[in-house]
Each structure stands twice: as C-alpha cells, then as structure tokens.
C-alpha cells in the first residue's frame, strides 16, 4: 500500500540516534498505530515493546534479530517481523524509507 487513508498524524517528529532515524506517528481510524519514517545510513539497535512489522518502502538494509547471528538483507517491497520485548540491529546501506506497523 503506497498511501495511508483516514489517519491522524502527530506533527511532532520522533528523532532517534542523533537524527539518524526520524519518523512521525500515524493513528488509523481502527485505532492501530504506525510510524512512517526514514533511517539515514548507519548501524543502529532498536528495542521493541509491542510486536512490530517493519515494511521497507525504499532503500536497502541488513537486519539481525535478537538471538540470531545471521544478517538478512531487505530492500524496498520487503518486510520483516520483530517479536514483542525484543530487539534488532539494522545496518542501513542507503537511505531507508519505512513504515513500522505495531501490534
């Protein structure tokens, strides 16, 4: 899906890792929450509270989920899932546009 319809957008940006990751929170009519953002080329570690699906819109990255020793390559049009109360490392190989789906 290239467009989100009937949403409430939080105008204040979420800025993480000294500006290497910037997103905006979006609430859908059904109550679900997403963030839409960009990660600049870097290697970062994210911790999760809720389960997440990271949808890669454009760009390339390598991801290593908590408990794994293997890096997996993802690019635009692909996604990966992260368990609740877990973590993942992401190595963005180029500017990465993403949507994070929670729950």
Image: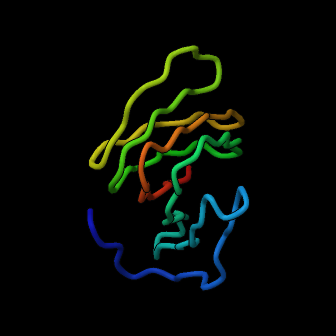
- The colour scheme of the drawn protein is rainbow
Q: Looking at the picture, tell me which residue is in the foreground, 27 or 65.
A: 65
Q: Residue at x 66, y 82 (%)?
A: 12
**Position above or below: 87 against 12:** above
Instruction: Estimate the x, y position of residue 45 in percent, counting from the top left.
Output: 67, 39
Q: Residue at x 64, y 17 (%)?
A: 67
**Position above or below: 42 against 16:** above
Q: Is residue 68 left or right of residue 47?
A: left
Q: Residue at x 35, y 73 (%)?
A: 4
Instruction: Estimate the x, y position of residue 41 in percent, counting from the top left.
Output: 51, 50
Q: Residue at x 57, y 67 (%)?
A: 23
Q: Is residue 2 left or right of residue 83?
A: left
**Position above or below: 6 against 86:** below
Instruction: Estimate the x, y position of residue 65 in percent, counting from the top left.
Output: 57, 27
Q: Looking at the picture, tell me which residue is in the foreground, 21 or 42.
A: 42
Query: What is the count of numbered marks?
Result: 0
Quarter that holds the N terminus: bottom left
């Amino acid at each position: 899906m290239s467009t989100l319809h009937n949403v409430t957008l939080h105008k204040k940006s979420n800025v993480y890792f000294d500006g290497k990751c910037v997103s905006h929170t979006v609430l859908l009519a059904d109550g679900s929450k997403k963030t839409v953002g960009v990660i600049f080329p870097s290697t970062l570690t994210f911790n999760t509270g809720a389960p997440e699906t990271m949808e890669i819109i454009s760009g390339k990255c390598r991801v290593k989920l908590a408990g794994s020793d293997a890096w997996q390559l993802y690019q635009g049009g692909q996604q990966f899932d992260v368990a609740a109360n877990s973590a993942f490392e992401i190595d963005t190989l180029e500017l990465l546009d993403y949507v994070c789906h929670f729950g």
